[in-house]
Amino acid sequence: MNSKELQTSDTKQKIYDAALRILSKKGFKNMSIREICEAADVSIGTFYYYFESKNNILYKFYEKGDTYFKKEIKPILNSDDALENVRTYLLSYIKLVETDGADMVEHLYIPDNKILKVNRAMQEILKDIIEDGQSKKQISKKMSAEDTVKFIFVIMRGIVFDWCLYDGSYDIESYSSKFIDYITRYLSE
């Protein structure tokens, strides 16, 4: 990268980091572009040069999770046992949520966040696992792969929502492991 590209990257990251700090304190609805710009020490025009709207901040946040799953998690989902791959995937999802922290995550689990409804790379990876397991007869075909992914994410988001309700006060990995066992047992029936 040349110096101009580095500066561009640094400025965009500075805006993004400022937005995440505000998001974790005030929530998505309550943060303004003006506030983000003040925290990042950039003009509003500079914000719009890098982001079309504050929604694009959320897109970048979710893109980070998708990239993590594509680069870090997908390569380790190599068991011949599809249910083991589902378990690894779901525990990795919980670890990612835990890393982001309850303060941040609670501001993302809101009805206005339409990104939660979109099929993203993260869900596509799980769908591939489900399809592989169904083709090997390790995962039931009582639901389509798409419906199975929705089913699993409804449960997992419920776990995350509960964790946020309790301000992240309990060990979400331990708590979720029994639900992950229930999910994999259901998928195998």
Image: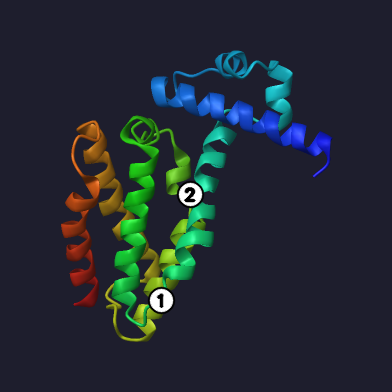
Q: Quadrant of residue 25?
A: top left
Q: Report whether 127 appears left or right of 173.
A: right
Residue at 67%, 32% (x, y): give it. 12
Q: Quadrant of residue 51?
A: top right
Q: What's the coloring here?
A: rainbow
Q: Report whether 4 appears left or right of 15.
A: right
Kind of element beneath mark 1: helix
Q: Residue 95: x percent and y percent? A: 34, 50
Q: Which mark is residue 147?
A: none
- Indicate which label's residue lies in the foreground, 1 or 2: 2
Q: Which mark is residue 65?
A: 2
Residue 182 visible, this orientation: yes
Q: Residue 10: x percent and y percent? A: 69, 32
* Mark 1 or mark 2: whose residue is earlier in sequence: 2
Q: Report whether 92 appears left or right of 43.
A: left
Q: Where is 14 relative to 173, above or below? A: above
Q: Which mark is residue 131?
A: 1
Q: Residue 180: x percent and y percent? A: 22, 61
